[in-house]
Image (cartoon, rainbow, N blue to C red):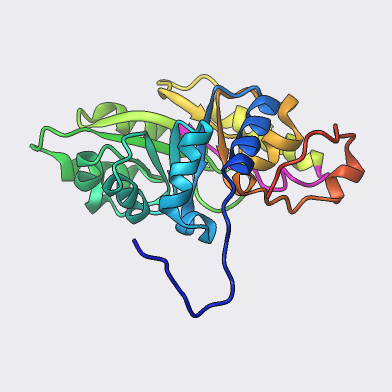
């Protein structure tokens, strides 16, 4: 992949030490065991090949992408780490994802069944994640009844593996603690005492892992903009919450 643009006057300089620092600080703050480096949109325009290499060097153990094509690019670059596609993918590409060991997200029982049909007779298995909408209002299950039906559908298919369940917090980098608490209660309501548990759960993004780590208990943190030292919540959150001044992510 060639991103050379010699006639442009703007460049991005990537600091390995800054990426290492940012990952380490947020991982320790959230008491996480793993970091999923979210490198969607060409790693937030920082260059996917370059940021993938820096993320793994810094200690990330897996990747999160928005689209299947981005995940395929990482596989073509030689990365063997787990990759989650966090956006929705057409079920007709289930076989391709299974061949490349890429986890796909589905938000309806019908799309899950369609993905299983694509894998029939292939001998392949696809890792499936089920997003839960706790208040971001983007994608995911809002009804517990629908979520349970989807889990049962995944479990009934020999070609599917119930790999993960996750949500994404809105307003987790603002002083709106009431909405953070609401989303946590929604997660608990929707996911408590399910008929089958996934292999893993993840629901901590940069915002909540940075500002509200005491409210979460998760082994995996999805680190997106924080990896790059982007913190749009400053100075608001520094004014609202007492923060150790040593806890500063670097750009």
Q: Is residue 40 visible?
A: yes
Q: For this rendering, which residue is in front, 232 or 127?
A: 232
For residue 191, side relative to residue 169 (left or right): left
Coordinates of residue 4 in the picture (x, y in percent): 42, 69
For residue 119, side relative to residue 47 (left or right): left
Residue 122, above or below 214: below
For residue 1, side relative to residue 10 (left or right): left
Which residue is painted at 33% across and 56% down in the image?
69
The residue at the far bottom in this view is 7
Classify residue 158 by image quadrant.
top left
Which residue is painted at 46% across and 36% down in the image?
56
Q: For this rendering, which residue is in front, 69 or 229?
A: 229
The residue at the far left in this view is 121
Residue 69, above or below 9: above
The residue at the far front in this view is 6
Which residue is painted at 87% across and 43% down in the image?
238
Residue 171 lies in the magenta-colored region? yes
Q: For this rendering, which residue is in front, 106 or 39?
A: 39
Classify residue 19 by image quadrant.
top right
Question: Magenta span covers which residues?
Answer: 165-176
Q: Main secondary structure of the magenta part?
A: loop
Q: Is residue 146 visible?
A: no
């Amino acid at each position: 992949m060639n991103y050379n643009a010699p006639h442009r006057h703007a460049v991005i300089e990537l600091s390995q030490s800054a990426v290492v620092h940012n990952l380490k600080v947020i991982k320790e703050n959230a008491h996480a065991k793993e970091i999923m480096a979210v490198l969607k949109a060409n790693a937030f325009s920082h260059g996917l090949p370059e940021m993938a290499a820096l993320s793994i060097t810094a200690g990330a153990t897996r990747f999160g992408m928005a689209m299947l094509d981005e995940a395929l690019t990482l596989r073509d670059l030689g990365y063997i780490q787990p990759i989650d596609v966090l956006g929705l993918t057409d079920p007709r590409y289930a076989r391709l994802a299974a061949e490349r060991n890429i986890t796909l997200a589905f938000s309806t029982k019908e799309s899950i069944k369609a993905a299983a049909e694509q894998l029939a007779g292939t001998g392949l298995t696809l890792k499936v994640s089920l997003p839960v909408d706790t208040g971001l209002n983007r994608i995911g299950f809002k009804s517990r009844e629908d979520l349970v039906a989807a889990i049962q559908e995944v479990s009934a298919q020999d070609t599917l593996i119930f790999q993960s369940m996750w949500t994404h917090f809105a307003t987790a980098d603002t002083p709106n603690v009431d909405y953070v608490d609401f989303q946590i209660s929604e997660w608990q309501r929707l996911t408590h005492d399910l008929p089958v548990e996934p292999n893993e759960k993840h629901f901590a993004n940069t915002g909540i892992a940075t500002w509200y780590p005491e409210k979460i208990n998760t082994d995996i943190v999805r680190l997106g903009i924080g990896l790059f030292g982007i913190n749009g919540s400053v100075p608001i959150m520094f004014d609202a919450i007492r923060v150790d001044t040593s806890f500063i992510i670097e750009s």
